[in-house]
Image (spheres, helix red, strand yellow):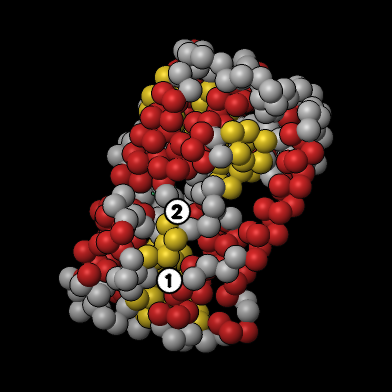
Amino acid sequence: MIKRPLAAVALTAALAVGAAACGGTTKNSSASDNGGAAATSGAKANPNAPLKKGLKLAFLPKQVNNPYETIVDKAGIAGAKEFGGTAKEVGPSDASASSQISYLNTLIQQRQDAILIAANDPNAVCGPLKQAMSRKIAVVAYDSDAAKECRDVFINQASSEEIGRSEIKVMSDLIGGKGKIAILSATANATNQNTWISFMKEELKKPEYSGIQLVKVAYGDDDDQKSFQQTQGLLQAYPDLKGIIAPTTVGIAAAARYIDSSKYKGKVAVSGLGTPNQMRKFVKDGTVKKFELWDPANLGYLASYAAAALASGQITGAQGESFKAGKLGSRTIGKDGEVILGPPTVFDSSNIDNYHF
Ligand code: RAM
């Protein structure tokens, strides 16, 4: 299971600050409590402002043909209906660094009230995002962050540190704390995967993992075929590999499919982040014992409400501000404009049939 104390401490601290913000204080934030432009421009939040009707929201995922992103955005679009807004999803079919820029330019021209982006690269999208903010378009990063100064808030699926560290813990359990492992990531620029991987590397420094050797980080670019081939390549280069961590739903499904039909089945552990629907078959046939994820639908829903709160002036993105996120209740903005959805769930054969996404 995921260790909780860190999140609990962070949450308690955030709630304490949030309570102050709810008491009617408006907050002029400084660069130290949030890099978001609205927050740093001195705009004032009005926690009692009603959500505006008819808000236009646009979701720009890493790529549109990724089942994970589809779940997130669909739920975000449904969420917008609850507060009388309209939302749509537009985006590229590949997750390369620059693939989102032309979409951003169009959304700015269309004068959307909010742009929600899962950034393929934290910096490549910065220019157009800053332009959007200068035109009073709220910018919400979700799933994969943009550079802090280029968005108002970041809706993170779970604590990045907890995700990274727990991936190592899970893999260590699966391989008995010994052997070579590799990481099969998404794209080389993805903010979310790179942050998780840096925490995985940190975790690996602990003495209890001294028997584990990370031999390679490979990139499948969140492309099914490329991820499959990269898995094959890893096993060719390291036939004695003991485990693959794929912190991407596309990567883990492709890695599991390769291992399932190869001579490495039962010898190489596959873990990481996956959707229960894509992983069910591999859990049932024993290829995958354990993996993790959060509820992607709740991520999109939370992002939608954050966008509406920003576009309505309820929040500016400053640390300590709170907003109501429909069925998810009140949420408070933490350090660096980050809002955390909650701890991930660990799936295995005992619980996977309780989840259908
Ligand atoms: C893939 C994407 C996404 C990530 C999930 C876990 O679908 O890379 O950004 O959050 O995996």
Contact check, label 2 and label 1, Cβ < 8 Å: no
Q: Write down the quadrant of residue 283 in the picture.
A: bottom left
Q: Write down the quadrant of residue 275 in the picture.
A: bottom left
Considering only order in the chain, which callout, 1 or 2, is on the residue closer to the N terminus? 1
Please state the horizontal and vertical placement of residue 45, each as a whole percent of the image. 73, 24
Q: Nearer the viewer, residue 29 or 244?
A: 29
Which mark is nearer the camera, 2 or 1? 2
* Residue 229 seen from this side: no
Please state the horizontal and vertical placement of residue 169, each as a whole percent of the image. 51, 74
Amino acid type of the residue tagged 2 in the rendering: Trp
Report the residue marked by disc 1: 182
Instruction: Name the residue located 42 percent from the left edge and 19 percent from the top edge.
Output: 86
SS for tag 2? loop
Crowd band around label 1 with a 10 angstrom C-alpha radius: few (<14), some (14–19), many (20+): many
Instruction: Name the residue located 65 percent from the left edge and 59 percent from the top edge.
Output: 8
Mark number displayed over residue 294: 2
Crowd band around label 2 with a 10 angstrom C-alpha radius: few (<14), some (14–19), many (20+): some
* Residue 248 seen from this side: yes
- Where is 5 relative to 85, above or below? below
Q: Is residue 238 left or right of residue 160?
A: left
Q: Is residue 218 left or right of residue 149?
A: left
